[in-house]
């Protein structure tokens, strides 16, 4: 990984990737592994963030296995989630059973995303064609005769230009590359936001319920070993009104929703310990322009429902490498090749977003806006609770997605 002091002011490469998140780091690793000179630009000094998704799904674990990285990866500290269940009022609900999946790792790995990204960066150091530039914030795209030919970036040592045959926008839901390229975004709509915080977990705590739903309240708890990573779902734009009621009132609501958290809610000492995730569901009408392709959240922002955003981003990276990698290496890539990625990955993205919208409309919105004192789970949740087959189907949708990608073997250079 390059240090800021070693960042070149200008360089030429085959592929320039804006964004060192799951899509960008995975694609950079795959392309460099295939012999494509690749530069990944990450605007931060490291991969630590206030909010990063913690879920590594079975589909991603399968990719790590195909790359020969799985055994080393699983030596990192992590927890395993092989089923999803929770409380809906007084009802215990069962949603998904991952152990029924026919895959080597039939479970979700809970691991800080920065550990996953650091792992890819460390493994990538052995690839001579991969350069990861930290503290390099993309500010604009470069154009020649209307075609994107790279990016401008600010580094600690001044502006830099990275020129490339192909530029990838993998810089997230607020993508600078997407904005500067003028690609049109279609807003699907998300009626929720999320407040993230953590509290200590008692070693003897036995209730590992994933979801806690009470009248007007939805709380997700991820077991991270010695602490709970908590996500409090709120109505879109309601963060300020929640804060106006005061931290004590907020924590009282949390304690009533998930009583097992009460002993350590004092760990949340101020609103600085609570991070807001503004939820969006959107997608690009066109993922590409001459010389440019957007993937991951830059192409289709996901709701946190199901925790599938990382999964989709990595699957996009696999498809991009499979479809474009060999053409990049042999310098035969044409602009007409770029829409193939959207044709391959748009359907899974749309299906996943439809699943998320359905969950929002049928479960989250009625709970958050209703005035009922006694709740009964929707029919779909009741059916899942009593049907192993439906729980297996839910596990496949969440864990593997709607179109599973596989890493193609690297072809010998001609």
Image (tube, rainbow, N blue to C red):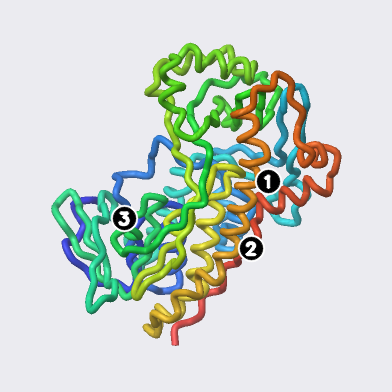
Q: CA distance from mark 1 to mark 3?
A: 34 Å
- CA neighbours of label 1 inside 10 A, class few (<14), some (14 to 19), many (20+): many
Look at the numbered disc 2 and give the secondary structure of its residue: loop
**Quadrant in which the C terminus appears:** bottom left
Is 180 in front, or is 155?
180
Work out whether mark 3 precedes mark 2 in sequence or the reverse, and give the earlier one. 3
Number of marks drawn: 3
Q: What residue would you read off at disc 3?
A: 176
Which of the numbered marks, if any, corresponds to residue 19?
A: none
Residue 107 visible in the snapshot: yes
Q: Outermost residue toward the left?
A: 158
Q: Residue at x 61, y 49 (%)?
A: 57
Q: Nearer the viewer, mark 2 or mark 1?
A: 2
Residue 104: image x %, image y %? 70, 55
- CA neighbours of label 2 inside 10 A, class few (<14), some (14 to 19), many (20+): some
Which of the numbered marks, if any, corresponds to residue 107?
A: 1
The vertical placement of 32 against 280, above or below, is below
Q: What residue would you read off at disc 2?
A: 404
Look at the numbered disc 3 and give the secondary structure of its residue: helix
- CA neighbours of label 3 inside 10 A, class few (<14), some (14 to 19), many (20+): many
Q: Residue at x 45, y 73 (%)?
A: 34
Q: Residue at x 66, y 27 (%)?
A: 213
Q: Nearer the viewer, mark 3 or mark 2?
A: 3
Is 387 in front, or is 281?
281
The vertical placement of 299 against 14, above or below, is above
Q: CA distance from mark 2 to mark 1?
A: 16 Å
**Quadrant in which the N terminus appears:** bottom left
């Amino acid at each position: 990984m390059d240090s800021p002091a070693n960042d070149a002011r200008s360089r030429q490469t085959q592929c320039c990737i804006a964004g060192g998140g799951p899509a960008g780091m995975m694609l950079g690793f795959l392309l460099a592994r295939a012999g494509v000179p690749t530069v990944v630009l990450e605007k931060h000094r490291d991969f630590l963030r206030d909010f990063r998704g913690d879920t590594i799904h079975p589909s991603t674990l399968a990719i790590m296995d195909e790359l020969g990285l799985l055994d080393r990866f699983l030596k990192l500290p992590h927890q395993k989630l092989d089923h999803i269940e929770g409380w809906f009022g007084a009802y215990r609900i069962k949603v998904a059973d991952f152990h029924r999946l026919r895959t080597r790792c039939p479970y979700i790995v809970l691991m800080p995303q920065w550990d996953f990204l650091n792992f890819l960066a460390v493994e990538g150091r052995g690839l001579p064609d991969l350069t990861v530039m930290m503290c390099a914030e993309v500010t604009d795209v470069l154009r020649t005769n209307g075609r994107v030919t790279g990016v401008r970036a600010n580094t600690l040592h001044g502006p830099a230009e990275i020129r490339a045959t192909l530029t990838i926008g993998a810089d997230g839901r607020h993508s600078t590359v997407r904005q500067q390229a003028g690609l049109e975004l279609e807003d699907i709509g998300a009626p929720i936001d999320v407040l993230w915080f953590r509290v200590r977990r008692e070693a003897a705590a036995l209730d590992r319920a994933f979801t806690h739903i009470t009248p007007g309240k939805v709380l997700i708890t991820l077991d991270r070993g010695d602490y709970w990573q908590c996500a409090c779902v709120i109505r879109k734009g309601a963060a300020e009104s929640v804060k106006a009621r005061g931290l004590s009132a907020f924590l009282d609501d949390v304690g009533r929703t998930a009583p097992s958290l009460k002993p350590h809610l004092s760990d949340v000492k101020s609103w600085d310990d609570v991070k807001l995730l503004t939820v969006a569901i959107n997608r690009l009408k066109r993922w590409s322009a001459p010389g440019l392709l957007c993937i991951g959240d830059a192409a289709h922002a996901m709701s946190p429902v199901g925790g599938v955003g990382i999964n989709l981003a990595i699957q996009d990276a696999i498809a991009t490498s499979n479809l474009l990698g060999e053409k990049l290496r042999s310098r035969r890539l044409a602009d007409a090749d770029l829409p193939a990625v959207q044709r391959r990955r748009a359907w899974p993205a749309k299906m996943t977003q439809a699943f998320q919208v359905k969950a929002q409309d049928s479960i989250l919105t009625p709970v958050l806006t209703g005035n009922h004192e006694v709740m009964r789970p929707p029919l779909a949740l009741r059916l899942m609770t009593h049907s192993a087959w439906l729980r297996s189907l839910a596990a496949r949708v969440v864990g593997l997605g709607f179109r599973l990608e596989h890493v193609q073997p690297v072809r010998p250079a001609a």
